[in-house]
Amino acid sequence: MSAAIANSQVEALPNQARRVVSDVAARRRPQPPHTPRGSPPPAVRAAAEQGAPPESGTAPWVLFILLNATLFLRPAEIVPQLAGLPIYECVILGCLALSLPAVLRQLKYRALVASPITLCVMGMLPAIVLSHLSKGDTWYARTLGMEFVKVILYYLLLVGLVNSPRRLRQFLIAITVFALCLTGIALLRYHGVIELATIAPLEQAQAENDPDTGASIIVERLQAAGIYANPNDLARIIVVGITLCLFGMSRRRAKVPWVAWLAPLAVFVYALRLTYSRGGLLALMGGLIVLFFARYGKAKGLVVLIVLLPALMLFGGRQTDISTSKDTGQSRIKLWSHGLVAMRSSPVFGIGANTYFKMAGNHAHNSFLEAFVETGLIGGIVYTGAFFLAASGLYQLKSEEMKARDPELWRMRPYLLSLVVGTIVAQLSSSREYSLPTYMILGVMTVYLGLAARRTPASQIRMSPRLAGKLVFVGVTTLIVFHFYTKATARFG
């Protein structure tokens, strides 16, 4: 009865007043959520987010952070009394025992199809084993296979435990802190403040002698301990630290003010200078270029890049000499040529993992090429494919829906894209295709793409025959490019 009276009263109003009443009533009615054009229906998006695995308990997460601390700081190499203790092995086994469901969940068929990067990482194991089994060498197949299983376990723990934006931020901060501690200890040893038998600067003669005296110029290159007991390896993790410091400075409403990141940033830049690493500087330059363009757009990114170019004057000498026509550059080109020739004897399975040094007298100083030569087309394609998927997945992730639903996660994208591009550039001048830090970067990219897919299911990349064909094309094209580049730049005689 009251509804009928209300309707009759509305009809009695003038047309203009009636429209006002109708507009007010429409605003009070619940509106369906706005769905951007081309995005999946709300039910599909909700199902995808509800299917996200919950965060694991505190104990496995703390153990995983502790695992990374031992990986970076190597307590047995800093404290002599701890030498010989299997600290890393005990921590990773404890973490694995508490996180077994999260690890096994990734090995299911559907999970592997939904994570092509993980599939490529797993594919490196049979490539390594088959590279030696094809030669009848069961000992190396078993030994190197078991070593790479440790790398896979770390990767699976990372992807399984870092399964939320909060965990991802915590992990990136932890990596920055550990890298800073590692670099700080190396700097203290470099300047003689502390004495550590396991850490010492690397003395290396430069290619050119002193023009006045004719004597060799010896430089002391900064290096750390453990898996970073090499100036180039230390330079790569320093570049990661620089990128993450820039990310920390960019965070809005963060607990740590942006100015607090300036001190660690300065330490990292100073340490990178002391490594005299060409690959590290190139990785930094490549990563920063991508970061500025992805973060600020083409026009603003170019302006920022031009403003920061004078900072390269901090580096000089050996570090900025990247010519391939001189002795160092030519020696690496010749190493590449020897590997490509050796690959002809076994193009499918390769000459055997970790045999490049024995064949050519040195490593290739190119992870992608060395993967092709040592593990054949199988290993080379999956290794190249993992980085292609990481870089292209981040680059193509341009979703307005993700910006609206998780702005903080979206703001990570340019910095992680910078990390993966910097790693790719560094891989072109180093041989680290079986090294754990390489797969740590791939694990971070897998985590981010998985988190993004939960918010925008349409952006998820799934393994399919078409994608597999694309990875084969990318891998073979990469090998062909290396072949022609080597032929064009090599000078024999």
Image (tube, grey):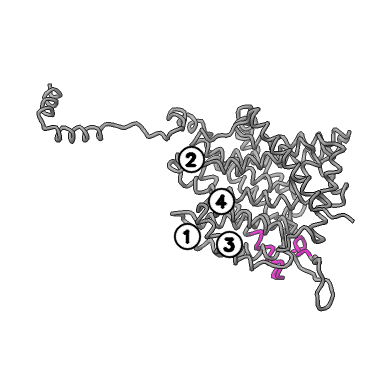
Q: Which residue is mark 4?
A: 415
Q: Secondary structure at mark 3?
A: helix
Where residue 162 appears, as percent x and y from the top left, is: 57, 42
Q: Which residue is painted at 67% across and 65% down in the image?
A: 273
In the image, the segment drawn in magenta is 181-202
Nearest-to-viewer mark from 3 and 4: 4
Q: Which residue is painted at 51% across and 52% down in the image?
A: 297
Side of 349 relative to 426 (left or right): right
Q: Secondary structure at mark 2?
A: loop
Q: Tell me the crowding category of disc 1: few under 14, some 14 to 19, or many 20 or more residues within 10 angstroms, Cα based.
A: few
Q: Quadrant of the N terminus?
A: top left
Alpha carbon of mark 4 to alpha carbon of mark 1: how far? 18 Å
Q: Is residue 187 magenta?
A: yes
Where residue 50 appears, as percent x and y from the top left, is: 48, 31
Q: Tell me the crowding category of disc 4: few under 14, some 14 to 19, or many 20 or more residues within 10 angstroms, Cα based.
A: many
Q: Amino acid at mark 3?
A: Leu
Q: Amino acid at mark 1?
A: Pro
Q: Amino acid at mark 4?
A: Tyr
